[in-house]
Each structure stands twice: as structure tokens, then as C-alpha cells.
Amino acid sequence: MPRKIACVLLAACAAGLVFAGPAMAAVDKAAVDKAFADLPKYDWGSSREVLNTIDDAVVKSHGDEPARADLETRLLAVLGAADSTGAAKQYCCRKLAMIGTVKAVPVLEPLLADKDLSHMARYALERIPGQEASKALAAAAGKLAGPLKIGMINSIGARRDAGSTPMLVALLKDSDPQVASAAAAAIGRIGDVAAAGGFNGAAGPLMDYLAAAPKETQAAAYDAALELATGLIGADKAAAAGIFEKLYAADRPIRVRCAALKGLAVVRPAETTAEIIKALASESPLFRGLAATLIKDIPGAEATTLFAAQLTKLPPDGQVALIDALAARQDPAARQAILDATKSTDDKVAAAAVAAIGAVGNAQDVGLLVAAAAGGADKAAAARASLQQLKGKDVDPALIAALDKADPAGKVQIIGALADRAADAAPAIEKLTFSNDMEVRLAAIAAIGALGSEKQIPSLVRLLKGIRQSNAIEAIDKALSAICTRVKAKAVDDLVANLAHGSAEAKAILYSALARSGGDKAFSTIVAAAKAGNDGAVRALVSWTAPNGIAPLLDIASTSADKVHKTLAIRGVIGLARLKDTPQADALAALAKALTLADNPEKTQALAALGEIPTIESFKMLASCLDDKALAEAAALSAVKIAPNVMAKDKDLVQATLQKVAAVTKNQRTKKLAEQLLAPAKGK
């Protein structure tokens, strides 16, 4: 060790800062010494300072064997002392579970028979490595009875100590059913091949016990056998298969048979196929569901073909389960069997088959699915979902090609499917926006909203100008809004070009679309029309989402003779003042102007907006409104909201205002907040 480092360590030790090795460098030796001196007297409800000091030392001893050995010796001394409290001894056991070694076994072993400390002693021994700990638990299990004996058995199982298997096998014959059940569970958890009877699955002690187990222990025995078999899968598949096979017998409980079948599917999948098919025909929904789940995971097109061939041999519920499983496999090898099942006279089977085509079908199945989607009933939703799910680059072209030949109901379904698939189909669908069939027309307009671009705007505008039905007008409005939100400025020229003609309603929709598009040209067009009093333009300007809308809206609010437009403009100003992109100074100026122009409902909104701007200027504006009875509550609420942020700017003003708030408000919460903010000043 370099001389300089050695000197530093020696100095630290001399100062009492370290002990028992470098990993303890941050531990205060004096504090640890005191903690261990006080530990024997620790009791429930006492301060945890003693424990916290030792906890810290244990954590910091990680990787330092001498330090851990020192701590273990100290813990064992407290544990073995006759005058140590039960709480102290339990604490020692918990720490020994973390750092204990074979050295701790002789001290812990006598405690196994103590009803108050047995549990914690077992807790420590379960985690201490080495056969000594296992032998101590086994010895105690041979001497104790009742709950304490069961505890020893559980701990042996937790340690997975194969050497204890003979002793546990003997305990299977114990007259206490709980002891026998615990022994069975421990054997299952240990997973010793010998307990299964060795290779080839010959009946072992646990399986022998299961055959004659009394009713009280049968459930535990089954669980133990299943756990044993599952544990053997990696070590001895033959032994595991032998146990699973016996547990799968027809006279076993259904839950046990399900678990056994699942195990067999893992250890010998090829040989289990026939049993899975039988399970599909079961009257038990649990069994059918498990079989379907297992089918999903067995690999290979050959398995798919084998399962699909069984489809018509099953009862309806079994067919539905198998169809769902085949769909989950997504293997085209099941396509023909599922297509045949769509013709089933059982509605549930037919609907399940239609739903499955989306997973196993191809473009050739478009016609069948369109017909099913247009036919209504249970098949319709399933068919629509399958149309969306179908894979392959030729599916979208097949759907588009089917549009020309389909009847109106079919067209509606194809259009919806193309929209669901986000297909490149806008030009083909655009033609149908002028269909004589209103259902087709509405479906096409909605799809254009989802799929279209600026290229479809002229058609929508032309349609808007010539249509009268309110539902179609609403659909065009939504479609234009969606497109303009996507393409932004690309839509502006076509929209502006069409503003010269058309009804007021149509123009209002175009102005609204312009607001969605944004940009300088859209803004100037909307502002000019709004200042001229166009209702649609005013409403579009109110929906504008950039701070440059504040000035023209204030102009309308100041000059318009139309009360509705004035009110709308003020609301728009308040909304824009609240935008995060609006500079604080501009927002304050806008709100100050709005307060002079607005009626009380909008003034209240403006005061709420001021409560979102934590400046002394906004606070002063709020303070000035406290004398107005109609505005006092809104002003008070916003004032207490921002008062903490502005107190340092003008303490006297803020405190005087808060006193006024407390005096005028009728809202108890607002009053309480004001008084709480004033309390520090009163304390002085």
C-alpha cells in the first residue's frame, strides 16, 4: 500500500471513523458500539435510532468480509444473551438473514422451538448457505409438532434442500393432515428427481402418496405434484411427462387436468395434439379455453393443417374456440377451413370465421368480407374488422376495384374500410362524394376528411355550394377542418378563391377552414371580412390561435355595433391572452382593454385570466376590482392565487389587498387563503 494512503487510513482509524476494513470507512465506530450496547434493551415502540445505525453499518459492509464477520459476532452476542428483549432478538434474526454464516447456526437452532422467535429464526436459517442450516431445520422438524413443525417443513422447502427429501417423504404419513400437506408442498418445491421415481416417470413417493391421499390433503398433494413436474421440465422431461400424464387422468379435478395438459404441451407437444383437440370438444369452457390457448403456441404449418382439419368435427363452442386459436396463429394454412366455416348455420361460428379471415385471408377474400359487412347482424362488425386487418399490398387495390361493382351498402363498407386502413384511395373515393345515394355520399365525405389532401378541397367546396342537406353540410365542414389542419397553408388559395360566391353558411365554413389552415394570407382574409361585419369571419377570427389575433379582435370589440360580435371578440381576446405564446405585456394590455369593454360575465373571465399572470401589474388590476360587488369574488380568488409571487414587489400593497379580500369575500376558502398569507405579518 502506498505510504500516503496507509497514513490516511491509520489517521482515520485513530479518529474512530472506521473499523473492520475499508468498506466501513463511512461508519462511526463509536456510534456502532453504542448502538450494540443499547440493542439488548430495544423494544417495540422505542426510537429506531439504534436500529438505523446498525442497518447503516450492515449496508456499508457489503463486499467487506471482515466487517461482516464483526457485525455477525455482535448480532449473535445480543441474540444469545438471556436479558435481550424479544424485539432485539427478532431484529438480530432479520440482520443475520442478510449477513449470517454457518457460525450463526448453533445460536439460531435453539430458537426454533421458541414459539415467539421460531419464525424469525427460520427466516434467518432459510437464507444462510450450507448444509448446517438445512440439518438444523430438519432436526427441529423431527422434534417439534403442530405449527412449529409445519414452519420447519416450509423452510426446508424454501431452501430446496434435496438432501431432506427422504425425511419429507416419511412425513407424508404423518397423522396431522397439515404436516402431511406441508411435506408434500416442500417435496414439490424442492423438485428432486428421486421424489418422482427417477427416469421414465415411474411412480415415486409423492405420486404414491397422491394415489392414497386423504381428502384433507388431496388439494395440497395435487399442487405439490404439479410443482414437482414443472420443476423437472428442465432437468428430466421424461419424469415430468410421467407425472403430468398421471395428473391428466379423466378422474382428476378439472383444474389439475388443465395444468397437466399445459405441462404435456411443453414437454412433448407433438404427442399432445390429439389431447388438445379432445379438450376443444369438452363441455368445460375452462378446458376449451386452455386448448385454444395451447393451439396458439404450437409452431408449424403442419400443426395448423392438422388442427384446421378438426374444425367440422367439433361442437359449435369448440369450433369458435378453435377458429379464434387459428386466427391467433395467423397461418394462411387455416384459410380454407375458416372460409368454409363462414357458411356455418350457427351464427356464432360464422361470425367467428368472418372475424378470423382478417388474420389468415388475402385480397381474394375482399368480396366475401364486403358482402358480410353490408349484411348486418353479428357478421357485419367482424367483417369490417377483418377488412381493416387483411394484410398484403394487393388488398387496397382490390378494395378500390370493388367499389365500381358494389351496391350502395357495399360501397359504404368499402369506403369505411379504406379509411380504416389509411389507404391511398382519396381520388377513387372523391368521385363518390357526388353519389346520388346519401349514405354513400356521407361515407365518402367522411373518408376524404381522413384520407384527403389539398387536392380534394375543390371537390368539397363545389359540393358545399350545391348541397342543402344539413347532415351533408356538417360532414363537409368536418372534412375540410380535418384536411386544413393537416395541410395548413396548402389549402388557403382554393379556400380564398371560393369565398366570392355561395351562401352565408358555406362562407362561414370556408372561413372556419381558413382559420384551421393559418398563415398570413388566411389571417388577412379573415380580418378584412370580420371588420366588414361578416359573421362567419368574426367567428373564425375568434377561433384563431396566434397572438396576432388580439388587435383585430379588440378593434371589433371597440367598434362593432353588433352586440354578439362584440361579446365574441372579447371572449376571443381573453382566450388569446391566455396563450403561452402571448407575451405577458401584450396579455396584460389586452385584458385591461377587455375589462373596459366587456359586460360582467366576460369581465369575470378576464379576471380569471389575470390570475394566471403572476405580476404586480396584474395584481394591481385585480385589487382595483374588489370594490365592484359583481366582480369582487372573481378578483379576490385571482388575487390570492398570485399574491405569493408578487409579495416581494410591493409588500404593503399586497397585504392591504389581502386584508380587503378577507373582508369582502363570501367564499370561505378564498378567505382562509388570504388569512394564511397574512399570518406571517401578524406574527411579527
Image (tube, helix red, strand yellow):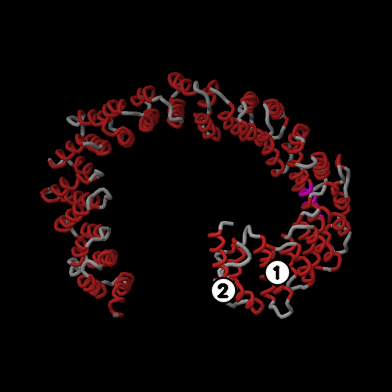
Where residue 131 sits: x, y (%)?
Answer: 80, 58
Is 320 displayed left or right of 265 in the figure? left
Q: Residues within 10 Å of mark 2 (few under 14, many from 20)?
A: few
Give residue 313's quadrant in the image: top right
Q: Amino acid at mark 1?
A: Thr
Question: Quick check: can you spot residue 428?
Answer: yes
Type of the residue with mark 2: Glu
Q: Which residue is mark 1?
A: 73
Q: Is residue 222 magenta?
A: yes
Q: Which residues are magenta?
A: 218-228
Q: Nearer the viewer, residue 668 or 231?
A: 231
Classify residue 24 as left or right of residue 373: right
Q: Nearer the viewer's eye, disc 1 or disc 2?
A: 1
The residue sitting at 44% across, 21% down in the picture is 400
In the rendered structure, find residue 49 and report the number of the disc placed on it. Answer: 2
Where is residue 436? Give x, y as percent.
Answer: 35, 25
Above or below 609: residue 288: above
